[in-house]
Image: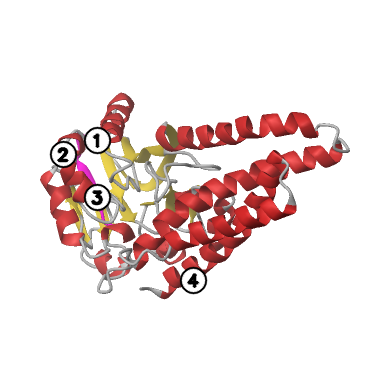
Amino acid sequence: MEFRYIIINIVAITSLQLLIFCFVRTLSWLFGWQKSTRKKVGWMLYLGINSILLVPFLTPYKIFRPMAFILVFLWFAFLVSAITLTLNRLSNWRLNALLRKVYPIAYLGLIGFALFNAYVPQAVHFSVKIDKPLEEPIRIGVASDTHLGVLFGAKQLDKLAEIFQQEKVDLILMPGDIMDDDTLAYEAENMQSSLAKLTAPLGVYATLGNHDFFGQQQAIYQAIEQAGIKVLWDQAVEIDGKFVIIGRNDDLYRNRPTAEQILHDVNTALPVFLMDHRPTDIVAHSQLPIDIQVSGHTHNGQIFPANFIVKMLNRLSYGYEKIGLGHYFVTSGYGFWGVPMRLGSRSEVFIIDVEGQR
């Protein structure tokens, strides 16, 4: 298990204990419990929730999945509690009875809003002009982090194909985390026919992200290729003499070359479009002859306030920025990880209109 995942789990488990405490206090306020009742319920929740994390058949990577669900539901309860407590204090507790009635509605409303953000995608448009010749403008559709699995599958892929058809994209790029760790749900629900609906005049290209490298990368690679999508495994392809697409494996792949090494055999007089799942190498890439890089991975935090955390950890955590020699894009992703909810982020695709010098 990687050190980063150990740290994440430690932080998550610690946060979980604090959120359980706050949740018990909220329940006590809602139902008017005595101190003895609050203690009993508190111990039951502490033991019950923490025991879930000790189920022996869960692998280290999967431990965080049930924890993520519990954390999110408790976090949402904390957010609503913080707002109601603030309103109570501002009103000198005159609104206490009303807020007790409103609390469940507000909590369910927040969950509904988070589900909407996760399952109702938006198309975000950008227009850039690069400093290399391009015979005609190209419209690129970008869909990262689909995380195909039990909670996100064929229906969402059909919607994705519909969006790209409506947007009339010329090229589709999918920079990583196509599957959610493995192909079990993908195969069980026969998602191949839906994934194969992703078509574009200049092709559909993908690269693998960290969740595609949890031991099932070969099966994932083959599944994507069988759907008619070209997976670029640390390689570059030249498209009709017009431009070059490079796809880098996630950095979990220990033997991956640098972008500079891949560029050695590339005609960089042509526009170069790079797919790199994580945006961590943007600063280094900004000094290379790369015109456009598309990335994902951050999910724009997925659940507030993680959007601020990923912003602190990355030069560009979300959106678009012209840096050095190139144009850099980081999308929040089309799917989600762990829990089917988003707060402070939205399921999306990027539509990038690219114009060159003439």
Quadrant holding the C terminus: top left
Q: Which residue is mark 2?
A: 190
Q: Position of residue 19 (x, y in %)?
A: 61, 55
Q: Amino acid at mark 3?
A: Ala
Q: Is residue 31 left or right of residue 115?
A: right
Q: Which residues are magenta?
A: 200-209
Q: CA distance from mark 2 to mark 4?
A: 36 Å
Front position among marks 3 and 1? 1
Q: Residue most toward the front?
A: 36
Q: Quadrant of residue 188?
A: top left
Please tell me which residue lies in front, 72 or 329: 72
Dot 2 or dot 1, earlier in sequence: 1
Q: CA distance from mark 3 to mark 2?
A: 20 Å
**Local crowd size for mark 1, using a 10 Å CA cut-off: few (<14), some (14–19), many (≥20):** some
Q: Which residue is mark 1?
A: 154
Residue 206 is marked as 3
Q: Amino acid at mark 4?
A: Ile
Dot 3 or dot 1, earlier in sequence: 1
Discs 2, 1 touching: Cβ within 8 Å: yes
- Is 239 part of what is drawn in magenta? no
